[in-house]
Image (tube, helix red, strand yellow):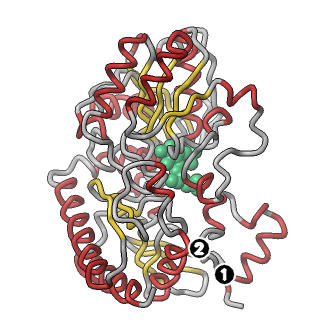
Amino acid sequence: MDTSEKLFAAACEVIPGGVNSPVRAWKAVGGSPRFIQRAAGPTVTDADGVTYIDYVGSWGPMVLGHARREVLQAVQNALREGTSFGAPTAREIEMARTICSAVDSVQKVRLVNSGTEATMTALRIARGFTGRTDVVKFEGCYHGHVDSLLVRAGSGALTLGVPDSAGVSPETSRQTLLAGFNDLASVEQLFAERGAQIAAVILEPIAGNMGVIPPAPGFLEGLREITEKNGALLIFDEVMTGFRVAYGGAQEIYGVRPDLSCFGKIAGGGLPLAAVGGRADVMDVLAPLGPVYQAGTLSGNPLAVAGGLETLRQLTQPGVYQRLEEKGQLVEEGLLRAVRDSGITACVNRVGSMFTLFLGVDSVTDFESAQAGDTEAYGRFFQGMLKRGIYLAPSAFEAAFISLAHSPDDLEMTVRAAAETLREL
Ligand code: KE4
């Protein structure tokens, strides 16, 4: 047994499944998860000292690359003043102002600790603001482990092949209505049946948790129209896409203004920080101003805010998103060449620096076509890439993330490894 295997065995004795988040257990790809010792720039190094080019990027936050000097310095400076006060700090105003200036639709922000808290709070705000009970979500979209949203969710829930979670009561999921991603007619149908009860529509504006699936032309605009017409709120879960695909998130690219947005991952620069924000009249329902309760001991934590602020500051440097786009193009073109040369059926979906290689299908535009992919082949692809020093998401239903730290050499090595791996699939 190597060190990671020994550590995994030890972890399994005291942590359910040996991990603190299911997708890390590699159930979908087999083998024993690598225990990571340290990370720097585009790489992670496991407990045996083996270094990999990393495309998990902590599931999205590490857009600058790991252990970025300026971010570490900002956190160290904050650390000297203490770790948590349970009281307001000036830095939280700066973070809220930063998000408001980055995202045109956001006028007020509440900081929380995780994407799950952000989406859970967004739903409660929507129900409190509209006085309605039902929420529309999309099959394959994942919004964290909120009870009412663990219904035909994506990511780990999909990876485990159990889209509905045990422990979610039928009463809870009854108020969650399911629509098809990129299927406006399915949304119109739900509003025709229950429009008066629908408080909000929530979605990932670019799906990342069934693999990457961009919105079809007109899809987001259509959702904006339907929700406006029916007095429901439109919630963009930009936990993954926020500050990833553009500084203003997916809504900057597609020009659709939601009423509420959720952020996380990059916003905290790898520390526990997330946020829900949006229209001031909607956000003002939140306690202590309004009747919708929400709270958190570590909300707006000084260390997390310091790390997040420096991360976002770095992303305002000129040309950052152009460089991420160029890196994404290099990988996409290389992968498509490798697929063509291998004769394997596969496709690549990409938006900026987030992408997914789907095996066994030649086009993925929704939940159904994503599920038609060959997950068994993906497991073999994952292992083949790992053997060649490339660390991908241990699930076919995730996004791969490129950082500013990935050099052209790293990307070319990745494409070469993919070509070799696809040939042996
Ligand atoms: P967290 O509670 O994990 O911080 O955020 C939940 C969440 C909400 N919305 C979107 C669009 C998300 O992608 C996520 C979390 N993403 C998963 C993987 N894609 C995190 C990895 C994990 O669950 O371990």
Is there a contact, CB below 8 Å, between mark 1 and mark 2?
no
Residue at 60% x, 59% y is 159
322 or 236: nearer the eye?
236
Residue at 50% x, 44% y is 141
> Residue 242 in the image: x percent, y percent?
36, 43
Tell me: residue 398, above or below residue 393. Answer: above
Amino acid residing under circle 2: Val
Mark 2 element type: loop
> Residue 350 in the image: x percent, y percent?
30, 58
Amino acid residing under circle 1: Ser
Q: Would you say 37 lies left or right of 421 here?
A: right
Tell me: residue 390, above or below residue 145. Answer: below
Tell me: residue 142, above or below residue 7. Answer: above
Label 1: few (<14), some or many (≥20) within 10 Å?
A: some
CA distance for labels 1 and 2: 16 Å
How many numbered marks does the figure carry? 2
Residue at 79% x, 70% y is 12
Q: Is residue 203 visible?
A: yes
> In this figure, which residue is indicated by the disc labeled 1?
4
Task: Specify the quadrant of the image occupied by residue 233.
Answer: top left
Q: Is residue 272 visible?
A: no
Q: Would you say 27 lies left or right of 109 here?
A: right
Residue at 42% x, 23% y is 188
> In this figure, which residue is indicated by the disc labeled 2?
29
115 or 213: nearer the eye?
213
> Residue 66 in the image: x percent, y percent?
42, 66
51 or 370: nearer the eye?
370
